Image (cartoon, rainbow, N blue to C red):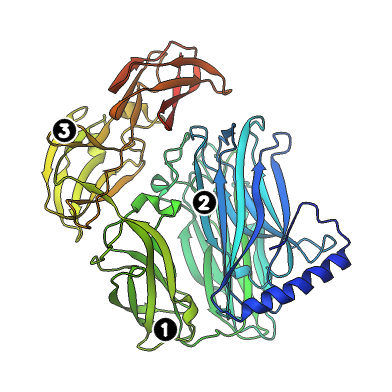
Amino acid sequence: MLNFGNNFNVPNMILRFLTLFCLSLIFNELQAAPGDTSSVKTHVNQLIRTDPSVGATSYKSWGIFPIQGSNVHKVMMKLSFKCPTGENCGEWDYLNFVYLRRKGSVNSTSLNLELARFITPYGNSFSSAWKSDWMIDVTDFEGLLRDSVEIEYQHTGYETNVGRGWIINLEFVVTEGTPIRPFKNLQNLWQGSYSYGDVNNPINTLLGTQEITLGPETESMRMRIMQSGHGGESNEGCAEFCPKTRTLSRNGEVFSQKLVWRDNCGLNAVYPQGGTWVYDRGNWCPGDLVYPDAFDFTVSPASVQSFEMTMPDFIAASYANYVVRAYALEYGAPSFQTDASIEDILAPSDRYSYRRFNPICGNPQVILRNNGRNALTSAVIEYGPAGGIKNSFTWNGNLGFMASEEVLLPANVVWGVSSGVFEVEVISANGQTDDFTFNNMMRSNFTTPYVAPERFVVEFFTNNSPQENYWTIQDISGNILYQRSGASALTNYKDTVDLPVGCYKFIMEDLGKDGLSWWANPDAGNGFVRLRKADTGGMLKIFNADFGTRVEFPFTTGSALGIENQMELNSDVRIYPNPSQGKSQLSITLEKPMDVHIEIFNSLGQVVSTLNPSKGEIITLDLPVVSAGIYFVKVQTGASSETIRWIVTQ
């Protein structure tokens, strides 16, 4: 892989010749092995910061992709985030973009194509060890990701750029092989930030109707649209906090009506965060990608296509806005008659994005997709640990071209080892071997879930909104074996459960989507939920009370897997009341007596107080009296730490 960074100033003719000569050797060799992957890293350990004077910073770098004319089956983009060494993470939820800019040379005209959109998390409470990554499919653009390509990462925002930022890595994973359908062209439909609520400039007038003429070789097309709402006008909180219905039409016929809305922010994999991360928003959540919608059509070559997008009429005193990027991608006919693929393994997986429901002890979850012209009506799927016992499942359904479905596989997995590689493979599609077998298998890394004693105690201390909370313990078939609901406020419940050897899941639900303790809802109070040993009362598992919508905790009892795992142990740190008028208590519960070091920072990152309480399993102490403001209380226990936002009012 060649990476010229930001210094792409070698004479273009010489560079172009040398680059393409080398790549003709490298990538022609790769084409001989469909299914092989190569990596193009454009941004490596790039420090990104805001520019408060402008509101946006740009980080451009060139990457060398497969040569024009080579076969590419799939392109996945991996975005990694972590905190800068010795500095604070970024604090606010800011828009970030990944653009495809120039191709070929620095003298080329920028294409200005948005490949991906990401919203940074509220990272002011993250420890220095925090890191995460996200994957997004950018195969739609594979026909343009050829030769020398300039990729720009754009970070917006106005927070301080002193001692605060992020480290990012951007990598494109290219899979060789016949494309699902040959790329022909891309045309722009909508691209910009459109005000919403301006009576003088209604959004539907700004959007208008877009008419395009397809190429003579175009037989199918895709509309790819990315839309997120921003701003918070005083009427309905639009467009960030108001769900509005978007209507899409093609040639005068409506083909999609949906809310521009994400209703699952409380299930974010990045949790807890320092800000209002649990609030549902205008098709985005802090600390996650903005996911595009895609619509596929069979079309006639050289035909005229008319697209219209409309939003409900709306008038506001201050204007909201929708950031929209929509493209018409033109393709030839599908390459395969019958082709089923495993597109993702949701569980088991060690991916950070799937940490809410991993690790598992049964019921693997995968994404099955139809890439062939024929409808996919059945598929035989084989799965299990690499080198171990494999199970077989026959899926039946009806998936059209490019349609996908989440498939829950039967529970009877024989793991055999505590960690390893999990494999899922499509053995046959529609009763036959499909036309392209190199996308039939996918692998993921797995670890088996935690082993609990057969008898333990669920301790649940309710907050002021117990009607929002209940917990259950379910077996592998989803049968509820134990539960606690209808609880009273500010009450400590201890329920002993006795389970035979097997696979189970503990679920704690919060219908208010803000957990048992959340700084932005102080009226709800502070609750907690823990698992304790039945004989000694010692801690087995402490769940973070700031969990948002749900806790899912798969576990086994006894030695169902033949593996002696230990239940994960951690700490529970709470401040109450929070917010307060200057007098609060800090409560720390540990799995065993430990030394604790506490630092209190103000909003500028300055240490205002340090505390070193006596060693203990349960530590309660008064926090110092401080002036009004926002503070961060960092609790260090051994090699781990946790930071909580503390708000003091007058």
In which image quadrant can residue 351 be found? bottom left
Tell me where residue 451 appears, x and y as whole percent: 23, 48
Left or right, residue 462 beside residue 68: left
Up-down relation of residue 236 to residue 368 (above or below): above
Up-down relation of residue 143 to residue 610 (above or below): below
Mark toward the viewer: 1 or 3: 3
Out of 77 and 315, give the one closest to the viewer: 77
| Res. 574 visible in picture | yes
* Residue type at tag 2: Asp
Q: Which residue is mark 3?
A: 493
Left or right, residue 607 beside residue 531: right
Residue in the picture at 45% in, 40% down: 277
Give SS at disc 2: strand
Q: Residues within 10 Å of mark 3 (few under 14, many from 20)?
A: some
Tell me where residue 558 appears, x and y as whole percent: 17, 51
Q: Earlier in the sequence, mark 1 or mark 3?
A: 1
Kindly identify which numbered label has been placed on residue 133: 2
Mark toward the viewer: 2 or 1: 2
Tell me where residue 102 appears, x and y as whole percent: 76, 62
Residue in the picture at 69% in, 86% down: 216
Q: Residues within 10 Å of mark 1 (few under 14, many from 20)?
A: many
Q: Which residue is mark 1?
A: 375
Is the N terminus in the top left, top right, bottom left or bottom right quadrant?
A: bottom right
* Residue type at tag 3: Tyr
* Residue type at tag 1: Ala
Give SS at disc 3: strand
| Res. 526 visible in picture | no
Tell me where residue 448 appears, x and y as whole percent: 30, 55
* Image label count: 3
Measure the C-alpha gap from mark 1 to mark 3: 53 Å
Left or right, residue 250 beside residue 360: right
Q: Are marks 2 and 3 in contact (CB under 8 Å)?
A: no
